[in-house]
Structure formats: C-alpha cells, structure tokens
Image (tube, rainbow, N blue to C red):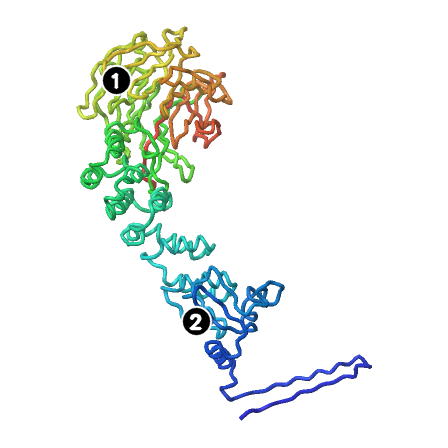
Amino acid sequence: MSKARYRTSARSPSMGFVVDVHLEASLSNSLYQPENILHSLNVFRKNGTFTDVVLQVEEQEFPCHRAVLCASSPYFRTMFMGKLCESSQSVVQLKGVSEDAIEPLLNFVYEGRVQLQEENVELVFQAADLLNVPALSRACVDILEKCMSHLNCLGMMEFAKHYSLQQLLEQCQNLLYQDFAIVVKQTEFLELPLERVVELLDSEKIQVQEEVLVEAALLWVHHQGSQRKAALAKLLERLRLPLLDPVFFTNMLEADELVQDSYDCRKLLQEARLYRTYGREISSERTKPRRQSGWAEVIVVIGGCDTNRMTRFSSTEKLDPTTRKWLTVANVPGYKYEFAVCELHNDIYLSGGQLNSSQVWRFMTQLNQWVSVGKLLKGRWRHKMASLCGKLYAVGGYDGHQRLSSVECFSVFENVWKPVAPLLLPVSSPALASCSGKLYVISGAVSEDCNTNTVQCYDPVKDQWMHLQSCPFSQRCLNAVSLNGSIYVAGGLLNALYCYSPKVDFWSKVAELPMKLENCELTVCDGKVYILGGRDESDVTTDRTWAFDPLSGQLTEEMPLTHSLSHHGCVTITQHLQHK
C-alpha cells in the first residue's frame, strides 16, 4: 500500500508568479527502497540485461550500464559523455586494472557496498584510484589501516608512499621505527631487495640499539646465504660496529661463519677493534652515534681563568647537543691553571698546571667523578697532552726555570708514566695533536721572548722524533686537533684557522677568524672543529665560540660559553642523553 500527498502553489507568470508543484510520497513497499532498486540494477548488470557497454579487463568482459558508471565516476563521465573515442564504442578496454578488482569495484558502483579482504584490498584501491571512485578508495584505506601489522608494514609503507597516503604511511613508519626488532624477523623483511635493506639500516629514525641492526643484517644474509653472502660487507659498513657491546661483538658478529669467511669484512672488524683500544683516534661515520640511539657527542669545558687571571675556575661544564644548554658536572679538585687535558677511552685526563704540579686526574664520565691516577714523573705546566695508540703523552712545557724537552707516556692499564724520547727542541705552549699514528708538536715558545716555527713529529714505534717542514707562523699559546687525517691549529693571536696535511706535508689557511685569539681551546664534535673562548689582542677573555665545517668550508658562530674563559681545557666525549 502506498500513500501520497500533494502540495501545489501557483502564481501567474504575467504577475511575476511561477508554478511550484511538490509531490511527496511515502512508499512502504520494500520493492521501492533505493537499495533494492540498486541491487536490481546490479543483478541486471550481471545478467547482461539492458546493458549498453562492455568493459574488457585483461581476458574478462563485464557488461555494464553507461548511465550507472557515469553517475558514480568522473572517469567514466569524461569517457562516455565527452568526445573520446570510447564514447561510441560498445567494448572498452581498461588497462592498469586487475580483473580481480573490477568485480568488487562494480558492486560498489552499483550498490554502494563491497566486500573487501586483506588479499584484494590493494588491488581494489588501485582500481578505485585509477577510475576515480573516491568513496571506494577511502574504504580501502580504512581497511588497510586496520590490517596493518608487523607482518606487512614494510610492503604497505611502499604502497602508501606510491599513492601519497600520508596517514597510512605514518602509521607504517611508526610501527617500523618502534618495533623494528619484531619486523625484521618477518618473511616480508627477509624477502626485501638489498637496496631496501641498506635504506633501512641507514635510517636515523629507527629506535633500536645497534646490536638489533647487526642482527637484522645477519638474518637477511643468512636467509639466502649462498646468494647474499657477497652483500654482507656492504650491509655491515653501514652499521656502527665500533660502538657495539664488546660481548655481542665477540660472540655474535666475529663468531658468525659468513663474517669470518668474508675478506671485505675484515677491515670493518679491525676498525672496531682499534676503536675499542684507541678510542676517538679512530674516526669514521661508523664511530658517530645515531641521533635516535640516545647517545651523542658532547663538548666538555674544564677550569680556566677570567680576564685578570685572578679568578680561576674549578667548574666542569658540558654542552647538551639537543637543548643547546651548558650543564654543570663534577668540579675539578682544586683550582687548575695552565694544565693540559685530553680524552682517552671516553674519559677525561687532566695533568700538571701551576705551579709545577705533577698531579693527574681522571674524570670518569660514567660515574661523573674525578679520581686521582698515577703522577707525572716531572711536574710541569704550559705543556700539552694527547692520546696516541691507546696511551697518553705529556709533552714539553715549563717547570718555572726552563722549557722542557721531557716527554712522558702513560699506560692506563699499568697506571704509571714512563719516559720516552725527548723533544728535539724544548718548547712550552705549543700546539699538539695525534694524527695517523704519530704525534705532532707545532710551534711554541722556546724562551720568554722567542717562539719557533718548528714542527716536530714523534713515531711511537721507533720512539724517535724528527723535524718536518716549518709551519707558516711562529707563535705560542696555540692549540690543535686532528680530523679526517688533517691537523687544525688556532690561537697564538693568529687571525686564521690553519690546516696541516701530514700525508703531503702541506699547510693551508682554511678560514679567517673574526678576532685574534690566544689560549683558546679546540675540539672536534659532530665532524666540525670547534674554537672556544680565549684572549684577544687586548688581553680580554671572551665567551664566544665558533665551528668550522671542513665539508662546506664555512665558519659559524655557535652557543657561547657560560662566562668568558682562557687557559681552560676542552674535549669531546660520547654520552647517553637523559631527557625527561
């Protein structure tokens, strides 16, 4: 039974009136419900009843009604209502659509509903995206988001990238980065091509320890060992092998049969062993912590004095690389002045200082504590200290009466200093750096009024010093650091940062400094040379700092010190950052 209501209103056209007739009908018979009409149309389609076009997909033909297709898709509307050749064709070929996807798509176009499974949802989405059925595309994305898991997130991530599905992409990435250790054990990861595995291992966003990445690389290679063993070195060279836990390195990596059989892996293993023995002397991309690991290189500034040299500081401060704030750590015992500092095995060593001190202190970074270690054989100040081949060297200096040629070597394991070959020319306040297995003493003072431009080089294997080509300056109160096989020197009221290449015995000026400084400090952090504090030509201390990037050749001003300083110490260590 049906009920109908009529409502009519009319106005004369001549008087500006128009006729407005409304018909409202309430139909209780279910045969007239829209969904039933749509269902009937879909049945007609499947039976070929009243159809006027055939869609050919691969080897299958699908009779359809042009009107329904045009009503549901701008793609078909353009095809059939425009001047395209398909508008007059009875059979239209659809390319780029799977025959497994077209039937679910047509069901949706006709009835507004579809059955989707994880197995076909990507194919249906591709068809809906190509044929411009946005409602079906959205429904497919909803299903994909619900189906995304550790088993399929890698493939789904590539799918989301290809179709610019940002929300789905972010969901996949978040799961991958947070649960990488689970994802790499799935078949999907083990079947990835080499280039994709390299891309994942290179990612700075994956939130796992380096040991998990090494395990992932080994799992992938062993999945098809005979075919993939040649790629092992390519994968391991992307990883921070020097930063691995020593037990894991020995028991898991070195003990792996494929690693042992790989000639190309040997130099990577050797680099890791040397790093554990020599520390920061071994430098490469593999010795730099990943940003997401929670570990980072941290600049530490120790002691120093103010402009009038009367206020001497015992403070130790470190620069948090994330917050860019200086943080206070344990103070140096006593007030140190004209001492020497260096880093070894991620701890900080401080030796000597006024007046004629022979004390040596070790700052244990894991404990945030200074402890006294073996004393120098000879007290000294205005000397320099460097680490070389896993040992410390205290070089030259002043004892209150004369410049010293004395050089001492400290063994951490024996906790004693031993004399080695003396300098060829006694100097105080020189620049000192270790580079490529040797020590380089550059310039320095030979008397109260005279400096030298001599460069002295020490070979620890031969226990022998030799003179090299003179440097292009003759100064005191200098400092030096080494980076990527080169030595960088600043201070001594020089107006530039100099670079020395031991390999070719050549000096060059690499950056003009904004002010002349002496008794400034240098350190290397994050691949850059940092210059911190010091005194200017007017004997006034500064809190300014700069960073030189050898790759770009640019010098930039950085975060200033907490107060103006000179005669301070500065090193870089690696620490775990704990932010709340």
Residue 298 vertical position relative to residue 10 in the rendered view, above or below: above
From what the image shows, is residue 475 above or below residue 127? Answer: above
Packing grade of label 1 (10 A; few <14, some 14-19, many >=20) is: some
The residue at the point 31 percent across, 32 percent down is: 330
Hey, what amino acid is under mark 1? Ser
Residue 456 or residue 301, whichever sits in front: 456
Tell me if 93 is positioned left or right of 354 in this view. right
Quadrant position of residue 425: top left
Residue 574 lies, in percent from the top left, at: 32, 34
Where, by quadrant of the figure, is residue 524 drawn?
top left
Is label 2 or label 1 in front? 2
Question: What residue occupies the far right of the structure in this picture?
Answer: 14
- The picture places residue 483, in percent across and down from the top left corner, at 37, 25
Of the numbered discs in the image, which one, if any, rests on residue 358?
1
Residues at marks 2 and 1 touching, judged by CB atoms closer than 8 Å: no
Residue extending furthest toward the bottom:
1
Q: What residue sits right under mark 2 in the picture?
A: 114
Query: Residue 209 — which label?
Result: none
Residue 12 in sight? yes
Q: Earlier in the sequence, mark 2 or mark 1?
A: 2
Q: Nearer the viewer, residue 537 or 413?
A: 413
Which residue is at the front of the view, 211 or 363? 211
